[in-house]
Image: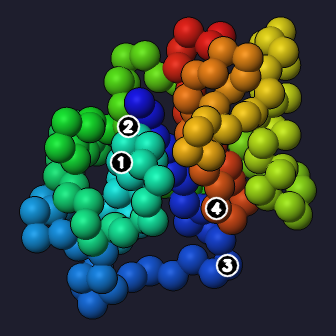
Amino acid sequence: MLGIDIVDIKDPSFKERNSRTLDLISNPDDVSIEHPHIFWILWSAKEAAFKCKREPLNFAPKKIPIKLSEADGNISFQSGDIKGEIKITDEYILAICGDLDNISFKTFEKSDDDWSEGIRFMVIEFFRDQGLDYHIGSDELNLPIIEPSKKEISISHHGRYGAVAFPINLL
């Protein structure tokens, strides 16, 4: 299982959140850190963990407990038995989780106004550039998989950025 989420921190609609808005997504079991983008770090971790579970439910961030930790400038998180990492650049916040030793990811910058289709096209082009003839399908829960291998992937997009997480053995 794997999950990914990306937040474009330079998106014109991006807004810093305060403690009141943080309460809207916080779970009583959350463990937080001090960071200027804490709302979006927590949001991304919760969404990545939700995707990792691959359940056909609506995303309810308040119901997903996240324990954040920071060491040597690296941020990691845990939600139950799901472990993940947060990557922060000047452009985006990315959360990835699952079996981190066996997962890879790729980020993309938007080139199309229809991001839902555009990100899927960019994922397929990425695999084609690796010499692989894959396409994106759906499993029985309508969640993304790579065909023909039927291995699960996780896709996210926000603002100018998109990302895909996939098993390393797909390459």
Amino acid type shown at disc 4: His
The residue wearing badge 3 is 12
Report how far apart the C-alphas of labels 2 and 1 lie in the structure.
7 Å
Q: Residue at x 15, y 62 (%)?
A: 30
Cβ–Cβ below 8 Å for labels 3 and 4? no
* Residue 10 at least partly seen: yes
Front position among marks 4 and 1: 1
Q: Residue at x 36, y 31 (%)?
A: 98
Which image quarter is the N terminus in? top left
Q: Closer to the N terminus: mark 2 or mark 1?
A: 1
Q: Secondary structure at mark 1?
A: helix
Cβ–Cβ below 8 Å for labels 4 and 1? no
Amino acid type shown at disc 1: Ala
Cβ–Cβ below 8 Å for labels 1 and 3? no
In the orientation shown, which residue stands out farthest toward the right? 112
Front position among marks 1 and 3: 1
The residue wearing badge 1 is 49
Amino acid type shown at disc 2: Cys
x, y (%) of residue 90?
55, 55
Task: Name which quarter of the figure residue 16 lies in.
Answer: bottom left
Amino acid type shown at disc 3: Pro
Cβ–Cβ below 8 Å for labels 2 and 1? yes
Q: Closer to the N terminus: mark 3 or mark 4?
A: 3
